[in-house]
Amino acid sequence: MHSPTLVAIAAILMVVMTLMLAAAWRFNPRIAGLGAWTLSYFFGLLVCVNLLLRAVAPELLLVLLTQLSAFLMAWLNWVGTRAYVGAAPVPRRYGVLGAVLLLATAAWFTVVQPEQTIRFTLMSLVVGTLFLLCARTIAQGRLQDHPARYLYALASGGHGLFLLLRPWLFRVGNHGLFDAQHAIVVSHLVVVESIAAIVLMAFGIVMLANEQVTLELRRIADRDPLTGVFNRRAFLALLDKGSHYAERMAFPLSVLLVDLDHFKKVNDNWGHQLGDRALHHFVTVAQACLRDGDVIGRLGGEEFAIFLPNARLAQAEAIASRLRGALEMQPLRHGEAAIALTASIGVAQRQPQEAPQALLHRADEAMYLAKHNGRNRIELAASSPSPADGTATPALP
Ligand SMILES: Nc1nc2c(ncn2[C@@H]2O[C@H](COP(=O)(O)OP(=O)(O)OP(=O)(O)O)[C@@H](O)[C@H]2O)c(=O)[nH]1
């Protein structure tokens, strides 16, 4: 049915792609899915080898090996795709069941009731469906945020559709005007389509791996290594973006400037390592008080900033109050000891056309006022740049 030359070309490409994916897997073992994808290409190579051995090996053995290899190629592709997007793994027993059913049917239509068309149709439907599932899995995330996923979704979805249509293409040839000649053309088309799909999907997978590496590098560049929140540079960049958006849409935006109280004493009394844990503890408590979309960053030392998109001063004050109370109520546990942590918080709402630095400066002034007024409290920034004496509106407890 297939031209041996085309199948040999597909086999060579399979070797190259398998080695390429194996190298990507070897150097990025933490990227989920790469292992399964590499194995999937290996089984794709076995399909090609089986097709090339058709003239010399026993029919039943070849049929079973080809069907099993094709099934495992598609199944492992789906397994790899699900692992990559972080979806729950498909229970292995479904794979085993699918393979056993496929092989039993193939054996029946080889030995008991020899019928190549039925075997071919069944394999096309099963494998095509699995490739369509790969496309669906990868397309379920937000495609616009992950351009590499477009290529993979298009390649596997297109291949899946083609596999579903494949038996019909042959049938048109057998019952139509072109018969044998048509079947040869279609079989060439099938191999050429497979070669294109193999190459496109493999490049899609490499791009997906590259996307993960890029995201990891960006994460390292943007995050404070101790607490995992945004570092100063990334936070200021996000605040800048958030401010522009708030200005354009006339949305409110508020900032909390948080400084842990007497943090030097924590370090002095309990050691620097526990001080580090205390910073981490603060972040955990703070994140539990924030909404999705609120952004927290560590400006340096024991000073943090949080910006709250779409929050007016009163809402920001309520969140600051929740955070201050939560921190006070949840001391850091160290064995039997409970290490009390408190914070002074300055709150400011962005004014029209106010630059992010000016907004932060007002929140900072309010935070210093909170320190000055006794710590473990919240102060609201004056609505216009603070007068020279630094007065802010009166305090919360
Ligand atoms: N453990 C730890 N300590 C840090 C880190 N960064 C800064 N610090 C410590 O934070 C402390 C800040 O001390 P100060 O600026 O005097 O402020 P404070 O003791 O919190 O006093 P107030 O802010 O006035 O309440 C210093 O002891 C720093 O060494 C860090 O990454 N880990």
Image (cartoon, rainbow, N blue to C red):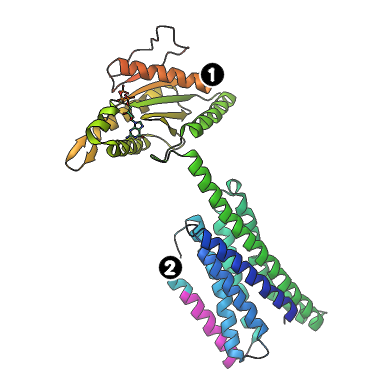
Left or right of 380? Residue 358 is right
Residue 113, quarter of the rendered image: bottom right
Up/down of 17 relative to 62, above or below: above
Q: Position of residue 144 (x, y in %)?
A: 60, 46
Q: Label 2's element?
A: loop
Give the residue displayed 46% in from the left and 36% down from the top.
230
Main secondary structure along the magenta-highlighted residues:
helix
Let me know if residue 358 is in the magenta part. no
Label 2: which residue? 91
Up/down of 326 relative to 386, above or below: below
Q: Position of residue 234 (x, y in %)?
A: 50, 34
Label 1: which residue? 354
Q: Position of residue 20 (x, y in %)?
A: 60, 64
Q: Amino acid at mark 1?
A: Glu
Q: Label 1's element?
A: loop
Q: Is residue 157 visible to the viewer in this orientation of the structure?
A: no
Left or right of 302? Residue 63 is right
The magenta region covers 96-114
Q: Amino acid at mark 2?
A: Pro
Residue 1, quarter of the rendered image: bottom right
> Looking at the image, is mark 1 or mark 2 nearer the viewer?
1
Left or right of 325? Residue 232 is right
